[in-house]
Image (cartoon, rainbow, N blue to C red):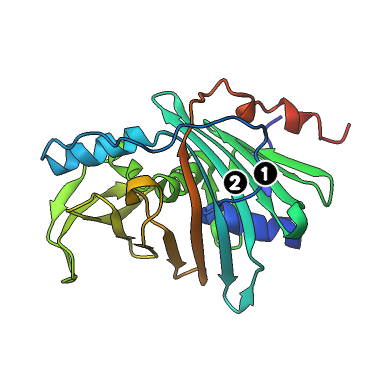
Amino acid sequence: MKTNLIRRSRALKALVVVVLLLSSSLFFGCSLFKKKTPAISSLPQRTGVFQRDILKRALFFSSMRLSGRLKLQAREREFPWVRINAWLVSGEGGSYLRIKGFAAFGITVFDLLAKEERAWIYLPRSGKVYEGFHFFTNYGSINVKNAVRAMEMILNPWSPVRYISPEEVPCQKKEHVALACFKGGFMGRTFTFEYVLEDLLPHRFYSKEMEVLFSGKTGENGCYPGQVQFFLSRAGIRGRLTVSNIRRVDIGPESQLFDESYFLGKKEP
């Protein structure tokens, strides 16, 4: 049955805000299962062609797990810190995303699965499962595919180059570090993507309505941003993600993490 993910309660409203920011959906807590994951020990060798190196970094992190803490504010309302675990697998067949959010004492706030063009959200407190092809908010609707692209843009900030034909453009601001800047159509909007030339780390992404700022370093070799701040001007939403752990993981779309039967089993008869 084709249904939509509609905000029907305060808990779900807060959740969709989290989802759309990534959407921050991000990351600390208990794993669904314990499995030793490979550390980030050796990044791909650079070729000297910047766009090609960005693509190699995107592919390097195409199967990953992040942990961290997320703080959100929607206009005048502030939400408590949420600890989040996120697993992302992206490939030619589409992107697969699982996110679990935790409140104090490890209590699960929400559990999200998005795969290809469909998503499921389980809210343990209400015992309800929502599923569908679109997320609806007070600020408009977004299909699951684009919502996952937005989340992937933050979880794997090199990923946009996989989905656009970037055009190199002059950088608008003079920064204390040398940058490379690219522009391209992404999620139906024109985005500019700024990366640091020295280490390929993301610096700033922005469009007319959205800005994402990256700072600090984490992970082995300092290869991943330690903090992400994002702003959605029309929606009056801002957030800060502090990343505590980043790992590449050896999982694929067939992983138990992306099996929707768990969510279907929670649905009311």
Quarter in which the C terminus is drawn:
top right
| Disc ID at residue 30 | 1
Question: Residue at image x 69%, y 53%?
Answer: 102
Front residue of 243/88: it is 243
Mark in the foreground, 1 or 2:
1
Front residue of 247/7: it is 247
Mark 1 or mark 2, earlier in chain:
1
Q: Looking at the picture, how far across and down is residue 129, in whole percent?
A: 76, 41
In the shown orientation, is residue 248 left or right of residue 167? right
In the shown orientation, is residue 50 left or right of residue 137? left
Q: Looking at the picture, how far across and down is residue 131, in whole percent?
A: 69, 38
| Disc ID at residue 226 | none
In the shown orientation, is residue 106 left or right of residue 154? right
How far apart marks 1 and 2 lie (CA) works out to 8 Å
In the shown orientation, is residue 216 left or right of residue 86? left
Q: Quadrant of residue 75?
A: bottom right
Quarter in which the N terminus is drawn:
top right
Seen as rendered, the residue at the extreme top is 254
Element type at mark 1:
loop
Element type at mark 2:
strand
Circle 2 crowding by C-alpha within 10 Å: few under 14, some 14–19, many from 20:
many
Front residue of 53/141: it is 53
**Above or below 261: residue 86:** below
Circle 1 crowding by C-alpha within 10 Å: few under 14, some 14–19, many from 20:
some
Seen as rendered, the residue at the extreme right is 269
Question: Residue at image x 50%, y 69%?
Answer: 238
The kind of residue tagged 2 is Asn
The kind of residue tagged 1 is Cys
Question: Residue at image x 40%, y 44%?
Answer: 156
Query: CB under 8 Å between callouts 1 and 2?
Result: yes
| Disc ID at residue 85 | 2
